[in-house]
Image (cartoon, rainbow, N blue to C red):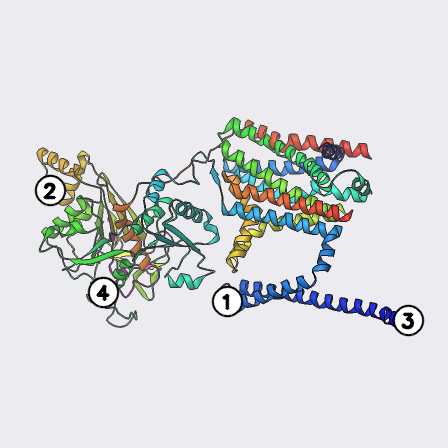
Amino acid sequence: MRRRDDAQRGLPRMAALKNMSSFRAGMILLLGVALVAVAAVAHTILMRHQVWTSLVALAGVGLMVFGASAMRRELAGMLGRRRGGIAMQTLGAVGIICALAYLSVLFPLRYDITSSKRFSLSEQSVRMLRAIDKPVKITFFHDPMMRETVELYELMVRENKNLSLVLHDPVLNPAQARMMNVQFAGIAILESEDRRIQINGPSETDIANGILRASQGKKQLVCFLDGHGEADAFSQESHDHMEGAAGHSHGMGAKVVLHEQHGMAKARQALESMNYSAEKISLVKTEHTLKRCALLIAAGPKVALLDNEVRAIRTFLREGGNAFFLLDPFVKSGLEPVLGEYSMVLDDDIVIDETNHFWADPSAPAVSSFNFHQITRELPLTFFPGARSISPTKDRVPGTSAIPLVNSSAQSFGETTQDRAQFNEGVDPKGPLTIMAVARRSPGAVRNAAEIMANLRGEKLTPEKVEEKLADLEKVKPSRLVVAGDSDFATNSFFHLLGNGKLFLNAVNYLAAQENLIGIEPRTFDVPRVNLTNQQMKGTFFLSLALIPALLAVIGLAVWWKQR
Amino acid sequence: MRSMAAVYNKEILTYFRSPIAYFVVAVFLLGTGYFFLFNVFLTGSANMDTTLQNMGILLVTLSPFISMRLFSAEYSARTMELLATLPLKPWQIVFGKFLGAATILLLLTVCTMVNLVPLYLYGNPEMSTVFAGYLGFFLLGMACIAVGQLFSALTQNQIVAALVTVAVLLAFWYVGHLRNYQGPGVLRELSSYLSFALHYGDFIQGLLRSEAAAFYLLVCAAAMTLNAAYLEWRR
């Protein structure tokens, strides 16, 4: 009797104990879930792997397993019920859908069905990319608007396992951008072995050529002309520029001051970081030194070049060489006839811009809008401390094209006298004045090319001489020339300020990259046009906007009326 | 299959007997016509990409008015119990109703193609791009209807169903903008992936992507799975 009472008392106690243990197990399970959630949130916020988050997650999983195992009977009971089964089946189905979505992203297929194939790579690019046999790491800094360019990079990387791509947004990841010395979205850093190349262009040609250059071991040689007081590419010297200080001016002060001490080491170092090598060369001793150069830079010669030096440069350009001339005001460099062959004339003036200038110096014109060109793409404000202007020749030399890149404002003028800065009507040329220009010369020649060039040099030509000159011109190879009416903007004192450095490097890239370029035709497509007559417009209006909507509205009204 | 066809037939009949579908399609065509004329008259472009882009936004805002009645009307007419007791599996009901709404979507799509007539007669449009755009439009519409159908099953009020669906679909449309904000890479990738607008943008430019097509189909599948599970749960 007593035993039965004990048993009766024990049953609810057993149930209570069981409930208590289920409750504890449930709490442990929930604690485990909470810890895993905390670890996931912490990992999301920190955006990097941490040991403690892993430990917390591990502890969470452990508690979940323990709790679930302690509650296995209750859980099995819940799942065994109808709604538990539905929940599990639904979770399973949603899981499968998520897995399929992940697989679809992992193994994407794409079909470009546009007639111009504007979302595909050209055959030349694909051929070139497949031939790359060295690893090239591409770090592309982009913003959300650059989806097409990102895709272009992704397409290229898919063509060769040697190519790898890392994407960063410089706004969201400024530290990475700073570390790689990147200021703007749209810049890619290409690294291969010890080479490092920076490219700005978003086109297929720009990217493909950048990859090609990065993968090639050979460095391009940039030659700095020496021996005429040019800015020294190996000199670190620079000035503190307290403009307005007595006796210091790059342009119109008491007189023009030429800074012979200015070095160009900053520009040279920037070039070397972009896989160029730099050398100073003198053309006095040997005229054939230039053959090794991918590019010649004459950075502000203070005295005129000798005839044989000019001849060497002319030969270099005729054989397909490219040059960057930075020529200061009121200095006779001896390069004037060479420029004439590219349809350009150096004016004997200094640009004074009272409206747009840097600091307090009106002879340092500042320019914020540029003519559209690869060199001036996305270029910030740039200034030129003491610049001369460049004009086109009276007659354009056939086979050449000269394009102004940088112009001073319409309020500027070219001061032709050296001792004052005052506009003289009819004497000083009015702005806008060209401070920097780019020119190209193509092979082949036409009859009047020889005559125009002879006129430029003041020569008199006999018919035989014309034939001789023409034959000579036929041998000319394509070459490029960039001329700036100032050298200071690229020297150590000003290279790092505003857009000056970028302008210099863009010009060098434009000139020197050419010999490696693969010829990819720029992808263009015409937007199909439709030109409608008045009657056709009326018909289109009626068909598109009135006919079917009105018909449907009438039927809808009829249905509504009938229902009513 | 036959039971599903019965649900489908009933849906189609209900659509054609209700004035709402006619008015929704008419308003949609009015909007489409306006955007098309704007494109042709003002820009002179013989392309459909701008029109299709605007059609996408219109679809996101108007398709919930097609899907809103799929289940909500059954609740308010008290026919849901009858439907639930028929020898039909929940997925058959869901799929049958979805096909009915998709047919209206197909009709709507075909009606908008009237704009291609002047484009083809007086211009020379790139038909492959137009085809890709319409494919994207139909896939987007299917996803919108599946989501709308789910919310229609969750509420008895048709207007609530439509408004919630519009809100959710607009969120799907604009979620891609979140990739502009500071955040972990995974979340940014996810916001791009979930964006209706980004996937649709590829289609209308003439780029067919497997992941974009799969995305729309998987959204349909997920919404219909949840819908069927909910019906099963209610039984």
Q: CA distance from mark 2 to mark 3?
A: 140 Å
Question: Which comes sooner in the sequence, label 2 or label 3?
Answer: 3
Dot 4 amino acid type? Gly
* Prevailing secondary structure of the magenta residues: loop
**Residue A131: x, y in percent?**
32, 44
Q: CA distance from mark 1 to mark 3?
A: 65 Å
What residue sits right under mark 4 in the picture?
A263
Check contact, mark 2 vs mark 3: CB within 8 A. Answer: no
Between residues B208 and A298, which one lies in front from this camera angle?
A: B208
SS category of the residue bearing label 1:
loop
Q: Which residues are magenta?
A: A483-499
SS category of the residue bearing label 4:
loop
Question: Which comes sooner in the sequence, label 2 or label 4?
Answer: 4
Q: Residues within 10 Å of mark 4 (few under 14, many from 20)?
A: many
Chain holding disc 3: A
Dot 2 amino acid type? Glu
Chain holding disc 1: A
Between residues A34 and A166, which one lies in front from this camera angle?
A: A34
Dot 1 amino acid type? Gln
What residue sits right under mark 1 in the picture?
A50
Residue sitting at 49 percent across and 41 percent down? A109
- Same chain under badges 2 and 1? The reply is yes
- Magenta segment includes B190: no
Chain holding disc 4: A
Q: CA distance from mark 4 to mark 3?
A: 112 Å
- Closer to the eye: label 2 or 3: 3
